[in-house]
Image: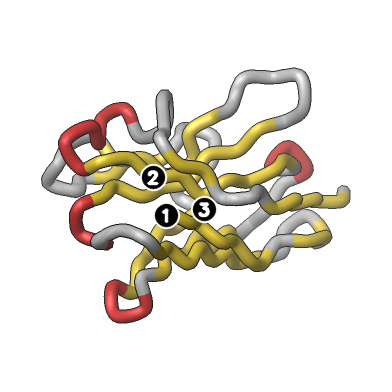
Amino acid sequence: EVQLVQSGGGLVQAGGSLRLSCAASGFTFDDYAIGWIRQVPGKEHEGVSCTKDSDGNRYYGDAVKGRFTFSSDNAKNTVYLEMNSLKPEDTAIYYCVATGIDYSRYLCSHPDYWGQGTQVTVSS
């Protein structure tokens, strides 16, 4: 069974930093693309850190480019999202998502698997 278990998040003041973690299990880590999306209730989800091809080339959403960084620890089957210079408009529920490596370009638009979601709230 594929599982994505998230941790981290919470409340932070504008300008602060947070790190989200996502521990993956139930699949071979290298066979899947993993990334992050976020969603504000009532709106479509937005790609935060996505993959564009099966080579693992990654891109970031325009709203977070230069402030957020994706990283992974393959030995721990865990990925991270380091979020710096946070702004109130970054407030959302953040989801770790995964899809088969052959469908990497669809990771953020149509992910196959979702983590449980983590609330990030940035106060002004």
Position of 109 relative to 118 (above/below): above
Position of 31 relative to 107 (above/below): below
- Whether residue 122 is visible here, answered yes or no, is yes
Give the amino acid type for the residue marked by disc 2 in the picture. Ala
Give me the C-alpha separation between circle 3 and circle 2: 22 Å
Give me the C-alpha separation between circle 3 and circle 1: 33 Å
- Mark 2 is surrounded, within 10 Å at the Cα level, by few (under 14), some (14 to 19) or many (20 or more) other residues, namely many
Q: In this view, does 12 lie to the left or right of 86?
A: right
Give residue 89's position: percent from left, percent from top.
73, 37
The image quadrant that residue 44 belongs to is top right
Give me the C-alpha separation between circle 2 and circle 1: 13 Å
Query: Which residue sits at x=52%, y=39%?
Result: 37
Q: Verify CB contact (< 8 Å) between mark 3 and mark 1.
A: no
Q: Verify CB contact (< 8 Å) between mark 3 and mark 2.
A: no
Position of 35 relative to 104 (above/below): below
Q: Verify CB contact (< 8 Å) between mark 2 and mark 1.
A: no
Give the amino acid type for the residue marked by disc 3 in the picture. Arg
Q: Circle 3 sits on which residue?
A: 67
Of badges 3 and 2, nearer the viewer stands: 2
Q: In which quarter of the image is the N terminus?
A: bottom left
Q: Circle 2 sits on which residue?
A: 98
Q: Circle 1 sits on which residue?
A: 1
